[in-house]
Image (tube, rainbow, N blue to C red):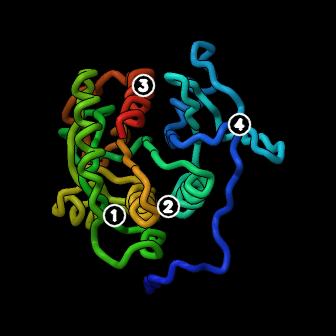
Amino acid sequence: MIRFDPERETVFGPFDLKLDGAPTKALMIFDDEIWEDYVLANAELVTQAVTNAYGRTFDNYRYIERDGERILLMSPATGAAGAVCDLELLIASGIRKIVAFGTCGRLDKNIAKNTVILPTAAFREEGTSYHYLPATDEIEADARALQICEEVFSAREIATVKGKVWTTDAVYRETAGKIAFMKERGCLAVEMELSALTAVAQYRGIDFTEFLIGEDTVDGEALPALERKNVTLFDSALEILQKL
């Protein structure tokens, strides 16, 4: 049993990475395809390696310039605990606005592959969030950020669906009974980080939102897959970030 402790003073905490240029906005890119094939491999997308005041270069960090502003791009750890460690370091380093995105498992066969899922809430079945907020079954998404996501994707004619998301630590323990339980509670998708990242964002008082790309399904396929538009997804994330 995890016992929430409201005490904010800790034995040690995240440290300031002293990132070059002191950025305040970041994308957390969980999707390997977009990170590797677009951010790192696409010569048309000009990025810079990230260094800090101590001369350290971060392999999973990049900078991109947009409208005269330096924006941090990051490939974070997978799973709630690792992703939260990455998020805490960003916040300690001055980042105040973050958009995260990655893939998820679809729980409904009537959601076509590559549909963008906009979480309204996350069902908390991971351990990390309970160290940041008192115990509840769900954690709500930021309503203003959700509206921004809806507007941006609608303008770009990207298919979206809104609903709850199930966050779990145990990807190989998604039993038929558990899936049915989550579907009954309105969950459209399953992934591994959202509830924890949302809890940290609320605890630290930063602007945060996440959208998900529907990937594998546990419910069969009822519709043909949609085209995966990686450049549009990346540009949409940047636009959402600028509007947060």
Can residue 82 be seen by looking at this rendering? Answer: no
How much space separates mark 4 and mark 1, taking CA atoms? Answer: 41 Å
In the rendered view, does 197 fall on the left or right side of 150? right
Task: State the mark number for residue 50.
Answer: 4
In the rendered view, does 95 fall on the left or right side of 47? left
Residue occupying image coordinates x 43% and y 55%: 206
Q: How dense is the environment of label 1, judged by Cα within 10 Å: few (below 14), some, or many (20 and up)?
A: few
Image position of 188 with respect to 81: above or below? above
How much space separates mark 1 and mark 2, taking CA atoms? Answer: 20 Å
Which is more toward the observer, 217 or 154?
Answer: 154
- Disc 1 marks a residue whose amino acid type is Thr
Which is more toward the observer, 161 or 70?
Answer: 70
Q: Position of residue 217 (x, y in %)?
A: 32, 44
* Residue that carries the numbered disc 3 in the rendered image: 235
Mark with earlier residue (4, 1) = 4
> Which one is closest to the eye, mark 4 or mark 2?
4
Mark with earlier residue (3, 2) = 2
Image position of 43 with respect to 65: above or below? above
Q: How dense is the environment of label 4, judged by Cα within 10 Å: few (below 14), some, or many (20 and up)?
A: many
Q: Position of residue 93 (x, y in %)?
A: 62, 52
* Residue that carries the numbered disc 1 in the rendered image: 175
Residue occupying image coordinates x 54% and y 36%: 32
How much space separates mark 4 and mark 2, taking CA atoms? Answer: 24 Å
How much space separates mark 3 and mark 2, taking CA atoms? Answer: 25 Å
